[in-house]
Image (cartoon, rainbow, N blue to C red):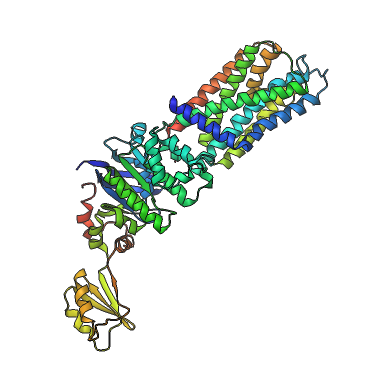
Amino acid sequence: MRSLLRLATMELKLFLREPIVLTFVFAFPVLTVLVLGGVFDDDDPNFEGVLPSDYYVAAYIAVVIAAIGLVMLPVHLASYRERGVLRRFDVSRYPRWALPAAWILVAMVITIVAVTVLLVTGQLVYGLPRPDDVLGVAAGTLLGAFTFVSIGIVLGLALPSARSAQGLGMLLFFPFFLLGGAGPPPDAMGDSMKSISNAVPLTHVVRSVQEPWLDLGSPTDHLAVLAGLAVVATAGWVTLASRATT
Amino acid sequence: MTAVVEVAGLTKRYGAHMAVDNVGFSVAEGEIFGILGVNGAGKTTTVECLQGLRRPDSGRMRVLGVDPRTAGAELRARVGSQLQASALPDRLRVEEAVRLFGDGDRRSAERLLESWDLARLRRSSFASLSGGQRQRLFIALALLNQPQVVFFDELTQGLDPLARSGVWDAIRDVREQGATVVLVTHFMDEAEALCDRVAVMRAGRVVDSGTPAELIARHARATTVTFTPPVWLDPSSLRRLPGVDRLERHDESIRVIGTNQLIAPVCAAVLGDDQLGPSDLRVHHPTLEDALVALISEPDTEPRPGDAASRTLLGVS
């Protein structure tokens, strides 16, 4: 446990020394807020009876979560592998799970900070609706973040280079982003698009945050899907980490 | 003496390529053991199996009495490793790296920083270090936490000659303090200067092993003395001197070939009345490099009958 905290502190310190890495995570979602909050008319009927800018609040959060899990983490970890940093850790006294576990801690901290920055921006620019169920929103956000961080660890440990991680990360990020609730609202989609949208994991993050926030129903199903994914991803990275990295 | 590292029948295959093919050797406590060979001979793969970085297809391995495949974490606390290709995060500073990989003993970490000339670089980030500085940092990291066995893969790569001999002294100190050292290298002068015993690998196999002197005696060319003979000398008279096997003529110069014993008599024989000898006289002693060149340039990969005696030494020390 001490070595885990030591590694997490180090990783966080290294992140803060290279703030350029964080621009995608912080700047892109803020940009999304500014664009999506403004494109739809307030009386657009496709938003389950709520204001479009309110409807997209959950999507902003999901964009942060997806950017960290699908792009930032995989690129970071894969570059560690590519450059031989993982090998150096592999011959150290740290157990093999310690570095990925430290990254989970760090990524969760970054998520919380980035989501906070984002919500403050949204509040200042458009004004946010009052959440119906604050604990439910927090639970959805944290579980969604944990699931995507775990997926990010799997991708980072499985992919051979930073470039491949960047490529695959982007390839996943944009469809997730567009179909997962940050793009057109599901009610504006055709049936086939809607069912594809339901298969995108990010959709479940959006619904898990949106439903308790706007009182649109019970998010239990979505939380269950996220929990299932988290279990699979955790088993995945634990297996990958226990393997020798060379 | 107890064997600290034991390998038998180690095999690792990448697709159709046999990277390591039935390799065996053992390293005694307190020994400096060298694994030699050209690039691609399987040296690094062998050591990576012992470090737990790779999983061999088959074979028996013991490091400090345990199998690196199953006792990874326990072993890594007792083993130091310097890897051929590795890195640290760019923004990590030298002193942070030492603290991160150390066991919290600040005094010994400080001593290592001093003795590897890293103390003045303590605030430097890894990205800003030169190749030689990185190499010294990796050696220092391998020696943290008083390891009982230390693996070095290309110990002095990227170091200038002065730094190299400093590193050699430091490795001898490590052994004096009781650690066992396994050294992968393709520098024969390094192996000759440091190693008690060596194994030579070629195409994934150990082709011979023994002390550097044994390998030189078995495989190296003979001692030679080369010079331009003075006009008054009858070169054929040199044939009768002790230790001389044969003479070779190369244009103006002559090469006397045989055992070490020939050096003094030949030099005496070429000394004129004026007490001056040929100014271009050169003596070449056989080196480990000669032995290695002979070993790796043998035409087939199968062991020759003449090598049978030395092969049986493998795996038994």
Q: Is residue A104 above or below residue B130?
A: above
The quarter holding residue A25 reads: top right
Q: Nearer the viewer, residue B217 or A224?
A: B217
Position of B192 compared to A20: left or right? left
> Percent x, y for residue A190?
74, 23
Can residue A159 be seen by looking at this rendering?
A: no
- For the point 62% across and 12% down, the residue is A135
> Percent x, y for residue A114?
64, 26
- For the point 68% across and 25% down, the residue is A117
- For the point 71% across and 25% down, the residue is A182
Q: Is residue B210 above or below residue B280?
A: above
State the quadrant of the N terminus of chain B.
top left
Q: Residue furthest bottom?
A: B232
Q: How many marks?
A: 0
Q: Is residue A172 above or below residue A146?
A: below
Q: Nearer the viewer, residue B131 or A141?
A: B131
Position of B20 compared to B28: left or right? right
> Percent x, y for residue B112?
39, 42
The quarter holding residue A73 reads: top right
The quarter holding residue A48 reads: top right
- For the point 56% across and 36% down, the residue is A76
Position of B134 compared to B61: left or right? right
> Percent x, y for residue B98?
43, 38
Can residue B225 be seen by looking at this rendering?
A: yes
